[in-house]
Image: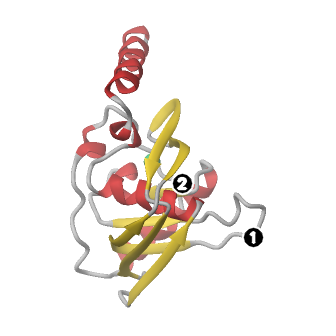
Amino acid sequence: MAVLPIYKLPDAVLRQEARKITEINGKLQRLIDDMAETMYAAPGLGLAANQVGELKRLIVFDVSHKEGGPRKLQVMLNPCIAAGEGEVIHEEGCLSVADFSAEVRRHAKVLIKGLDREGKPMEIAGEGLLAIVLQHEIDHLNGILFIDHLSRLKRGLFLRRLKKQAAAR
Ligand code: NI
C-alpha cells in the first residue's frame, strides 16, 4: 500500500465528473487500499478518487476513528443518493482545499446506494457526521467542492484569498 499525492484546488481533476466503475479487478483493489492509506495518513474522514487523480466513482470513508473508536474502513463504488431528508449545518473542510473551512448546509439523513468493493449491491443509511461525509464525497465524484455550497460572498472571499496565495508562491 502507498500514500498517494492528494490533488488540490485549482487542479482540474477536482472539477471533472468521475466515471462509473464497470470492472472490478486487482488494479481497482490496489487503488482502494492506497486511498484508504492516504485518507488515514492525511488524516481525513473520507476521500474520493478524484482527489488522487483517478476519475472513478469510488469513495472511502471512516467516521469511527474521529469519534475515538477503532478504524472501520468503508468503501463504496458508484455511490448515489437515493433519498435525503432534514437539514444540518456543519463546518466542513477538505483535503483538496487547503487552509479553509466553512459551514455548509446539507441533508441531515441520507440513504446511499452503491456497490461494495467486490461489486455486491449495498446501501447505507447515514445521519450526523456520516451523512455529511457521504454527501461531501459524492459531491467530489460530480466535480463539486464544499465551497460551491457557500454564499457568493463567502465563496468570493475564499477565491480572492486563493488567488493571493497563488500569486505569492
Ligand atoms: Ni473533500
Q: Position of residue 87 (x, y in %)?
A: 47, 55
Which residue lies at the image location 55% right of the left edge and 67% below the top edge?
127
Quadrant (top left/top right/bottom left/bottom right) for the C terminus: top left
- Residue 3 got which mark? 2
Of 80 and 71, the residue lying toward us? 80
Q: Which residue is at a point 36% across and 79% down the rendered structure image?
A: 113
Mark 2 or 1, nearer chain start: 2
In the depicted structure, whether residue 157 falls above or below residue 82: above
Residue drawn at point x = 51 percent, y = 38 percent:
103
Q: How crowded is mark 1: few (under 14 residues within 10 Å), some or many (20 or more)?
A: few
In terms of secondary structure, where does tag 2 sit?
A: loop
Image-based side of 46 in relation to 43, left or right: left
x and y percent of residue 44 in the render?
58, 52
Residue that badge 1 annotates:
70
Residue sitting at 37 percent across and 58 percent down?
49
Question: Please, what is the three-letter code of the amino acid marked with disc 2?
Answer: Val
**Is residue 48 shown to the viewer in this render?**
no
